[in-house]
Amino acid sequence: MTELTVLETGPLATVQDRGRVGQAALGVPRSGACDQRSYELANRLVGNASGAAAIEVTFGGLVLRAEADVVVAVTGAPCSGVPLNAPSTVRAGGVLRLGPPRSGLRTYVAVRGGFAVPPVLGSRSTDLLSGLGPAPLKADDVLPVGCEHGPMPGVDLAPVADPAAGEVVVRVTPGPRQDWFPGGALLGQTYTVSSNSNRIGVRLEGAPLQRLREGELPSEGMALGALQIPPSGLPVLFLTDHPVTGGYPVIAYVTAADLPLCAQLRPGQTLRFAN
């Protein structure tokens, strides 16, 4: 079997696919790739079926050695040292080294055939909150490569824009507890992405939102893209490893089309919400 050996991981590298879809009622989070758009593109560029496992790399630093010839594609946050948004071949004994990205946060590495790590509850995704799936990658891990793939797409380069380096504006729809806050309060300010953010959620810094009513809620179901307001008044934007329930009010949801933008936010970047 073809294999890739992990030499270095950078800050965080995990195996991800589309996640554990449809099991939230059983208490099983979805997880999966944060930036589904970039993840799916990487698989398409190497002829994989949708849902094949790839590697999600946070802020570069991943180094892989190919133990046999492999075809790979790198998408998402543009890391130095590797071809981006294009299929390329790494020869046996060759090394794929991802430098720090010039914009964005998360980069995806797909290999033709997909990474064939053992699935857990129907998915190969690493879930940092629940602990399901394979552990985050570490040096000397050996990743087997599968053999299920289709024809190559015949694309030399996918014309995809880099993630934004400046302020990002994302669209939201009303949440079930929007009436707990003044009308338009969320839309009227600029937030800064906190360094205390991860795959569970993006924590935002700015002027705290003031509640119109006191008291707490019983736990409610949580969804990807929910903007939850804890007692601090500072929003938390839930990403793919979010809990399945929560007891703080949800003021809004980020639209599905703009979730990939949120997955690429890096600490210190500014964010605004719009209708």
Image (cartoon, rainbow, N blue to C red):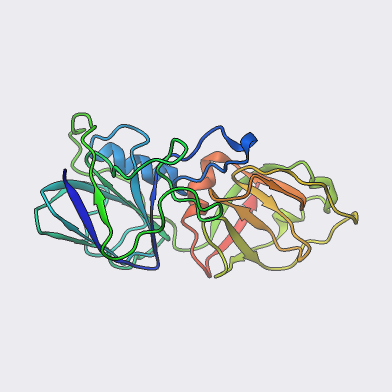
- Of residue 34 and residue 192, the one placed in the foreground of this image is 34
Percent position (x, y) of residue 77?
A: 37, 57
The C terminus: image quadrant = top right
175 is higher (above) or lower (below) than 165: above
How many callouts does the rendering have? 0
The quadrant holding residue 50 is top left
The residue depicted at 90 percent of the width and 54 percent of the height is: 213
23 is higher (above) or lower (below) than 42: above
Left or right: where 212 falls relative to 157: right
Percent position (x, y) of residue 181?
A: 82, 53
Percent position (x, y) of residue 235?
A: 69, 59
The N terminus: image quadrant = top left
The residue depicted at 56 percent of the width and 64 percent of the height is: 197
The residue depicted at 55 percent of the width and 51 percent of the height is: 130
- Of residue 173 and residue 17, the one placed in the foreground of this image is 17
Left or right: where 259 falls relative to 18: right
